[in-house]
Amino acid sequence: MSLKSDVQGFDISKNSAVIIGCGGLGTNAAVQLAGAGIGKLLLIDYDTVEERNLNRQFFYTKNDIGKEKCVILAERLKAYSPETDIKSHSGRFDSSLADGYDIIIICVDNIETRKLVNDCCVKNKTPCVNGSINGFFGTAYLFVPGITPDLEKAGCLNENGNKNLSPGSSAAIIGSLEAKLATDYFLGKTDSSGRLYIYDNNEINSLLIRSDSLDQV
């Protein structure tokens, strides 16, 4: 076992994830998974760092303004977790990019991208975690094909959170929760799948959407 797995009591070094969006949610999800010792990460984002991002995207500084987010994040995560195989793709999501990865983690506020990823996951039977924040409100949901409703059936495709109006604390809570849900999946903990986790100011609740009788396509 590695030092990380020995210390934390679990090993995810053979697991992999695609993180779409390297903003507030994506930076938090990525650092948590890298810190936990995930084996492989692919970071996807087509955007560059802006000054208005810095309150909630803690891996970037003013010196990074104008640079590609996914490239900067990959470089800094490699220094943080050198044992993790970290790649970046500067561009929009394409389903072929997810080939060979265990799970997709959605960290965008773009409904079209969320629909595209959901279609990809349903078609290819790939699990995914969806996250969204808006001010002091946020949600997270783990979709596991064959077990839970997909994002459309769970009502997640209409979420269009405004991250620009959200504090760093909201991004940290939901991004970390996305990493936790992905880790649950890696470890075979299915109780958290099919639950819509809702963060509302100072409370986190969950709404059970999962149906054991669901006929998932």
Image: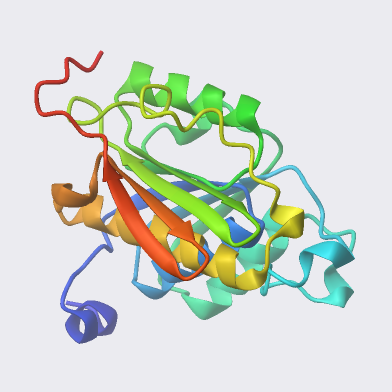
**Figure check: 110 above or below 78:** above
The percent coordinates of residue 15 (x first, y second) are: 29, 53
Q: Is residue 52 left or right of residue 194?
A: right
- The front one of 180 and 30 is 180
Residue at x 21%, y 34% (from the top left corner): 210
- The front one of 193 and 41 is 193
Does the image show residue 169?
yes
**Figure check: 45 above or below 127:** below
The percent coordinates of residue 149 (x first, y second) are: 28, 26
**Figure check: 82 above or below 188:** below
Q: Is residue 123 left or right of residue 176?
A: left
The percent coordinates of residue 152 (x first, y second) are: 43, 23
Residue at x 18%, y 83% (from the top left corner): 6
Count of marks placed on residues = 0
Which corner quadrant holds the C terminus? top left
The percent coordinates of residue 97 (x first, y second) are: 52, 33
Residue at x 55%, y 56% (from the top left corner): 137
Residue at x 44%, y 65% (from the top left corner): 176
Q: Is residue 60 left or right of residue 29?
A: right
Does the image show residue 39?
no
Which corner quadrant holds the N terminus? bottom left
Query: In which image quadrant can residue 68 be found?
Result: bottom right
Q: What colour scheme was applied to this rendering of the protein? A: rainbow
